[in-house]
Amino acid sequence: MPEVSRVDLTPAAAGLIRRLRAAHGPLMFHQSGGCCDGSAPMCYPEGEFRTGSSDVLLASLTVEGVDEPVTFWMSASQFERWRHTHLTVDVVPGRGSGFSLEAPEGVRFLIRSRLLTDAERAALDG
């Protein structure tokens, strides 16, 4: 079975990450828990959003043309509700949050989700 991940990127999201990486350096995501930004993946320069023991590292994403992995974090309490899902980071037209790096680009990252298969869940939980 190929390597199983909780998070993937669409080609459009990977392309935007390459452009943002060139402008801002190493990147990270933190999945917003709601409130002002809905449930949007927020993109920051790596380390700008402070993570701690209340956050879970879901993935270190490899992006072709980017030297280092892009980390993807979520709060532990939100992860408990989402642990059965696979997340795909995509990008669509429209302005997202003013705090996420893509906001000035006229596009926004969003999450598409599906339930993990039994095999994926076993591989991730095992």
Image (cartoon, rainbow, N blue to C red):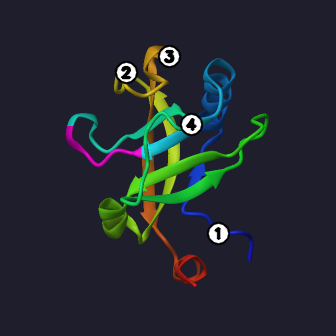
How many marks overall?
A: 4
CB under 8 Å between discs 4 and 3: no
Q: Is residue 32 magenta?
A: yes
Residue visible at 78% across and 37% down?
A: 67
How far apart, in angstroms, are the residues tagged by discs 1 and 4?
24 Å
Q: Sequence order check: which comes first, mark 2 or mark 4?
A: 4
Quadrant hosting residue 122: bottom right
Q: Sequence order check: which comes first, mark 2 or mark 3?
A: 2
Q: Sequence order check: which comes first, mark 3 or mark 1?
A: 1
Instruction: Tell me which amino acid carries mark 4.
Output: Glu
Residue interval drawn in magenta: 31-35
Residue visible at 53% across and 38% down?
A: 47
Task: Report the residue that reaches farthest toward the left.
Answer: 35
Q: Which residue is mark 2?
A: 95
| Disc 2 packing (10 Å; few <14; some 14–19; many ≥20) | some
Q: Main secondary structure of the magenta part?
A: loop
How far apart, in angstroms, are the residues tagged by discs 3 and 1?
31 Å
How far apart, in angstroms, are the residues tagged by discs 2 and 1?
31 Å
Q: Which residue is mark 1?
A: 4
Position of residue 101 measured from the top left corner of the image (x, y, whole percent): 48, 25
Q: Which residue is mark 4?
A: 46
Instruction: Tell me which amino acid carries mark 1.
Output: Val
CB under 8 Å between discs 1 and 4: no
Instruction: Tell me which amino acid carries mark 2.
Output: Arg
